[in-house]
Amino acid sequence: MDNKELLDHLYAAVPFIARITGGFATVTDKMGRRLKSVDAHGQEIAQYQGEVYEIARKAGQQQQPVSGASQFIEEAEAWALPIGDYVLCCSNVERIERNKKLRKALSEALPMIAKVAGGDAVLFDQSGRRLETADHTGCRSEKLIGKISQGAYAAMQGQKPVIGESISLHGVTAVRIPITEDYGLGFNNQAIVSQKQKLINEVKKYQYARYTLTDIIGQSDAIERCKNIVNYVAKGISSVLVYGATGTGKELFAQAIHNASDRSDKPFIAINCGALPSTLIEANLFGYVDGSFTGAKKNGNIGVFEAANTGTVFLDEISEMDWDLQAKLLRVIQEREVTRIGSTKPIPISVRIISSTNKNLQQLIEEKRFREDLYYRINVIELRVPSLRDRGKDILLLANYFIAKYNPVFGKNITEISQEVCDIFLSYPWPGNIRELQNCIESALNMVDIEQKRLEACHLPAHLYNSLTAHKKTMSSEDDNLAAILRAAEKQAILRVLKQADNNRCHTAQRLGVSSTTLWRKMREYNIPLT
């Protein structure tokens, strides 16, 4: 075969070689000068004509095959094979480029994959080491970066998808898919599992009712009326709707009703209607049968109504329940039977339903956000729990109760509350109700010295003073101007004596004829620096 015939054969072969190897294929002379180059699509690359290809030059001179890195991309590989007076060369440049573009595309798509999958989406290398992570919200995350997953390693070694437990959270299932020999894609259902676990924990928290009427602290007329209603209705079976602002103790009253009823030795199960998506709430309220939806347990699962049969179901924050779910709840209440998801067989139940809300359901009905027919079913008996600001001296009873509760926790020995603190407590509006008061006492006891016996104003959170000062400033009366003059004069007197006493607060208080606590409060009120 002469040189011309050999060259023609090589020219005819390079498109096939380029396509198979996924890169450039080239024919050069012995000196490495390019005679013809084509890409993986068989298209000739004219701009390389005549250029010296170093790896081909070496092969031509040595008259033996040579391999090494491509001159275009460091990660790419190339080889050169001398054939007569010519050299045949090939590289995987284009395959490397495609892999890089695919890697970049997957990286950009990772947040979208995570959101759709309902969990983490990750990219990992050939050893199963996590390179990138996006969580179910679509945000990039540094969680477990560099951590090696055995499942991901197995997928890369076998070059086939592997399904198994995720390394991020127990009980989470992950799928690992090898994309190339160098990296793979994985995703899990962590968000869905976390939501289900949250719901399970919510239900487990309220498997029994531990509070009774004796646990409800208060002697005000408003709270006594609530207790009397509980005593009257506890023995019945009628549904109860408990109204009250957040933190007023609606749940305590629900448990007290159950414990005062003939069902006290039966299950009490509470579920927060606003805590989770409606689909999860529905499955846990009504139960489901095997195969009714993806992720359903093999033998199905009973719902809250079945689990609470002969007992009480407490639907906390029922105003947050999805509209379609309200219709299904209405049928359960009307028919006294529940049908599991995926089944047509009704199951008779006997449960008492107590609901609670901190919203105006009548207004929600007008806004078409709550069903009127359901409202009349759950509101057979209405119990309105008063806000803390409407309970008068119950505030001090509760404050003393929480002090007794937290004294041993923090190793303190507070036995009384100063008159100034009492005045603040009784005048403060308590927007967070009992929960806010409890947090306030807990915060205050952190600020008390071990040897102190009395709770003073200086121990309280600053927002109580700020709120009180703002309240005073917004009061309008005929004496406003005179009050402002008196306050200004008082502030100036304090500033003058402080200066004379070299900012010694004890000496200043003595000269002004007030206690150190009163001086401290006045300085706070007038924004006088405490240093």
Image (cartoon, rainbow, N blue to C red):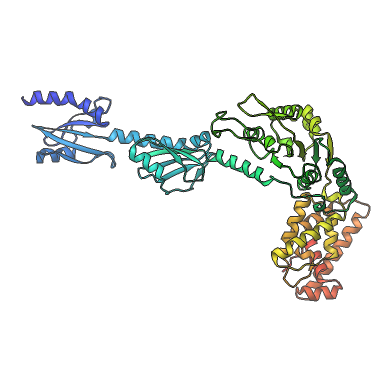
Point 26% across, 32% down: residue: 23
Q: Quadrant of the C terminus?
A: bottom right
Choose between 51 and 293: the one closer to the eye: 293
Counting from the top left corner in percent of width and height, residue 188 is at 49, 39
Q: Position of residue 412 (x, y in %)?
A: 73, 68
Q: Quadrant of the N terminus?
A: top left
Left or right of 119, for residue 363 = right
Say which quarter of the image contains residue 336: top right
Q: Residue at x 10, y 25 (%)?
A: 6
- Furthest toward the right, the residue is 478
Instruction: Please state the horizontal and vertical placement of residue 162, each as a whole percent of the image.
Output: 40, 37
At horizontal 26% and vertical 35% (from top left) the residue drawn is: 92
Q: Is residue 491 left or right of residue 128?
A: right
Q: In the picture shown, does residue 300 fall above or below 414?
A: above
Residue 461 appears in the rendering: no
Give percent across and percent down for residue 163: 43, 37
469, 250: nearer the viewer: 250
